[in-house]
């Protein structure tokens, strides 16, 4: 427990990977039930290749971000306490590189599949992450790390 009787963790509305998984299931389901094609199937190979490149780059970014967090002595799951404020690696450019990577992967998948559903759901996931996770994590980090976090937040963007 943190001071004041609050748990020493961010009080998030949901677990981010679960939100992304639900979004992916919805994306594939809606694409199958009610296709909303960005372009006719098989007609825009360069954008499909670009989508694959974005997905691959996003997973590399996510992996680097997660490894940096763990090596920095902090935890990945949002329901665990944050031991250290990690501000190196990808955290020099984004306060939320893991969430940014999740949303970029979603957008890349939208290009790969040529489906508006994934684009719409990427926006919905980003908004839900901001409201249900990021703003709550930021409040927790500000309470826990005070001026150190406030200074970091002034220097580094929330997304990218």
Image (cartoon, rainbow, N blue to C red):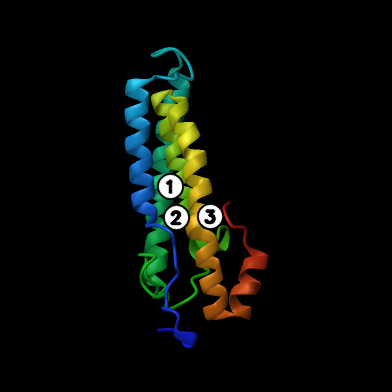
Estimate the spatial distance between the alpha carbons at disc 3 and disc 1, rounded to whole Å.
16 Å
The picture places residue 55, in percent across and down from the top left corner, at 40, 39
Would you say the residues marked 1 and 2 are in contact, meaning their CB atoms lie under 8 Å apart? yes
The tag on residue 98 is: 2
The residue under the point 43% across, 18% down is 45
Q: Is residue 14 left or right of residue 93?
A: left
Q: Earlier in the sequence, mark 2 or mark 3?
A: 2
Crowding at mark 3 (Cα within 10 Å: few <14, some 14-19, many 20+): some
Residue 93 drawn above or below residue 80: above
The tag on residue 131 is: 3
* SS assignment at label 3: helix
Estimate the spatial distance between the alpha carbons at disc 1 and disc 2, rounded to whole Å.
6 Å
The residue under the point 46% across, 53% down is 99
The picture places residue 154, in percent across and down from the top left corner, at 67, 67
Which residue, as the protein is rendered here, is positioned at the far right? 154
The residue under the point 47% across, 24% down is 47
The tag on residue 33 is: none
Crowding at mark 2 (Cα within 10 Å: few <14, some 14-19, many 20+): many
Residue 72 drawn above or below residue 58: below
Which residue, as the protein is rendered here, is positioned at the far front? 5
Residue 93 drawn above or below residue 24: below
The tag on residue 102 is: 1
């Amino acid at each position: 427990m943190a001071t004041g009787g609050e748990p020493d963790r961010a009080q998030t509305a949901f677990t981010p990977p679960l939100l992304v998984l639900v979004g992916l299931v919805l994306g594939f389901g809606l694409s199958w039930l009610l296709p909303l094609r960005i372009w006719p199937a098989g007609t825009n190979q360069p954008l499909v290749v670009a989508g694959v490149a974005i997905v691959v780059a996003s997973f590399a970014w996510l992996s680097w971000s997660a490894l940096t967090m763990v090596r920095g002595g902090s935890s990945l799951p949002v329901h665990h306490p944050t031991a250290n404020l990690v501000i190196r690696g990808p955290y020099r450019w984004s306060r939320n590189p893991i969430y940014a990577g999740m949303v970029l992967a979603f957008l890349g998948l939208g290009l790969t599949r040529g489906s508006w559903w994934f684009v719409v759901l990427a926006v919905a996931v980003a908004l839900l992450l901001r409201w249900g996770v990021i703003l709550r994590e930021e409040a927790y980090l500000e309470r826990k790390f005070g001026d150190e976090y406030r200074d970091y937040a002034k220097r580094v963007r929330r997304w990218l």
